[in-house]
Image (cartoon, rainbow, N blue to C red):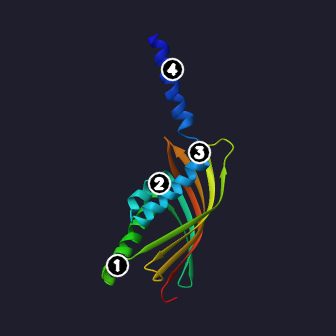
Amino acid sequence: MKKLFLLAILGGLSWWYFVGSRTIAEEHVTKFYQDLEHATLSRNPEAICTMLAEDFETVGTVSAGGRRTTSTQNKTQACESYKALYETFEQLGNRMGGMVQLDSSYKIHSISIRPDGKSAVVDYWSSLDVAGSLMNIRSRTTDTLIRRNGKVLILRSEGKGSIRTGGQ
């Protein structure tokens, strides 16, 4: 009887590891973007970094000040960029005599779950306004999300965005 019980437990754990903790559904995607927005508004780049897969890659084209640049970053590089961005927000707040207000919004245009249930491709739009009209960041992005050990992560992100500052 103990052996059957042990086999049942091992079978359940195996199923969870290889199937249950790796399949993704629309509810997982929706919750992921809610958590991402919360981390953004909480000024927590470390939390954002934990949402990136170890083999994460992003390709982005950004228009700012009349210039357009395209860059590719891995997880380490992206995390450094997030930290630098939030340090910039803090410095702006210090110069303005307080903490700058962040306003964020996003809209998911489509969620496509792959037939094997192992990943989702998400097309969405997002905006981040810093201190009202001091800095406005807009982007349209396509993310590939995966689920590992029950946690949803961004595997790949491709997007186009713009950054406007108060004087533009």
Residue 5 percent location from the top left of the image: 47, 16
Residue shown at the point (57%, 60%) measured from the top left = 157
CA gap between label 1 and label 2 equals 26 Å
- Between disc 3 and disc 4, whose residue precedes? 4
Q: Residue at x 41, y 75 (%)?
A: 101
Foreground: disc 2 or disc 4: 4
Q: Which residue is mark 1?
A: 93
Identify the amino acid type marked 3: Ile
- Which of the two residues, 19 or 54, is positioned nearer the viewer here? 19
- Asked if the residue at tag 2 contacts the one at tag 3, i.e. Cβ–Cβ closer than 8 Å, the answer is no
Dot 4 amino acid type: Ala
Q: Is residue 118 left or right of residue 3?
A: right
Residue 44 locus on image (x, y percent)? 38, 62
Q: Crowdedness of circle 2 by 10 Å Cα count: few (<14), some, many (20+)?
A: many
Q: Quadrant of residue 134?
A: bottom left
Q: How many marks?
A: 4
Q: Which residue is tagged 2? A: 51
Q: Is residue 27 left or right of residue 104?
A: right
Q: Which residue is mark 3?
A: 24
Q: Is residue 77 visible?
A: no
Q: Distance from label 3 to label 4 (Cα)?
A: 24 Å
Furthest-top residue in view? 1
Give the residue pinned by disc 4: 8
